[in-house]
Amino acid sequence: MIDISTAGTFKLCDRTVKRMGYGAMQLAGPGVFGPPKDRDGALAVLRAALAHGVDHIDTSDFYGPHITNQLIREALHPYPRDLVIVTKVAARRGADGSWLPALSREELTQAVHDNLRNLVLDVLDVVNLRSMFNPHHPVEGSLEAPLTVLADLQRQGLVRHIGLSNVTSTQVAEGRRICEIVCVQNLYNLAHRDDEALIDELAATGTAYVPFFPLGGFTPLQSTALSDVAATLDATPMQVALAWLLRRAPNILLIPGTSSVRHLEENLAAADLILPDDAMRVLDQIATPHVSA
């Protein structure tokens, strides 16, 4: 029996959630665009996640677009009281599936209302503002204007809490001068560790850090050292990669995504995996921190 509570809990906004959650991005079609190949399978994954105790789901209305939130609504509404749904705004999809900035007051307001409508909610638990200076990695630049819009929507009662995504430490500090920042969602995994200092900085203030692409995203993690450690622990390499993240810092909340119930259960089982110190030393050498250009 999978018991994700063994990974512990951490504060997310004004709630305490289990550290193993679920990311819904892969429920949309190829390239996170259009409907899934197996709609019933997508609904089954969402229901299985909750059945195994997941109480934190990450999504966005620009996944699909609209598709992922509509699947969450169909599978799970009315939602359990302990479920925290985190969404993100500041991007839109082109007709060709491209990812485009959507940072104007009108676009951000529309995005919040789209999320509310498709999820059938009166208020969104957490909305992450995604920096779009570069969609692939954080780039310095002021987020004051779009974050002020989100703060206005928060004051209107449409958003409970605000987080940031794809951001630098400087942008987090700027954001905190505008509103409370309850979480940061950036790229981080065994092979990509630019955020080592930021994770520790956030841990010191009790702020959740949510790594996206914890298993490598569209290019899954591959490492001989990772595979060797997994073999000695009778686990899969992906389970080891998730267990490493859970041990890395107590404020890390995981949202591995999948469209398969079998893979979902494999991911969640990583909560029970204990990495010995010698395994951690090997895994820590897979990548070293560096600063993106």
Image (cartoon, rainbow, N blue to C red):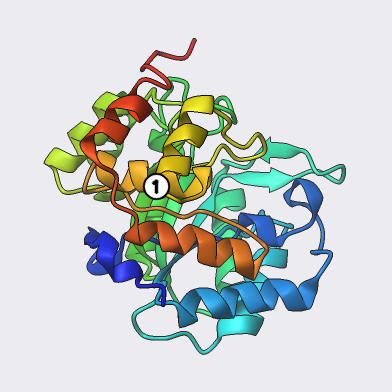
Q: Is residue 105 above or below residue 248?
A: below
Q: Nearer the viewer, residue 222 or 52?
A: 222
Q: Amino acid at mark 1?
A: Leu
Seen from the viewer's position, the closer of residues 61 and 11 is 11
Classify the position of the N terminus by image quarter: bottom left
Crowding at dot 1, Cα within 10 Å, few <14 / some 14-19 / many 20+, comes out as some
Rendering coords of residue 278 (x, y %): 26, 32
**Which residue: 27% across, 35% down?**
199
For the point 46% across and 42% down, which residue is it? 230
Residue on which the image places disc 1: 233
Q: Residue 26: where, in percent of width, then height?
A: 66, 56
Q: Position of residue 23 (x, y in %)?
A: 53, 58
Whether residue 177 is visible: no
Front residue (pair 265, 251): 265
Q: Residue furthest bottom?
A: 78
Q: To which quarter of the image does residue 63 belong?
A: bottom right
Where, by quadrant of the figure, is residue 29 drawn?
bottom right
Residue occupying the point 77% across, 45% down: 31
For this orientation, the residue located farthest to the right is: 96
The number of numbered discs placed on residues in the rendered structure image is 1
In the picture as drawn, the residue positioned furthest to the top comes out as 293
Task: Provide residue 196's location: percent of width, then percent of height.
Answer: 29, 26
Please give left or right for residue 214 compared with residue 97 in the image. left
Judge whether residue 271 can be spotted in this image: yes
Question: What's the residue at 34%, 53% (across, down)?
Answer: 253
Question: Relative to residue 232, is residue 103 drawn left or right?
Answer: right
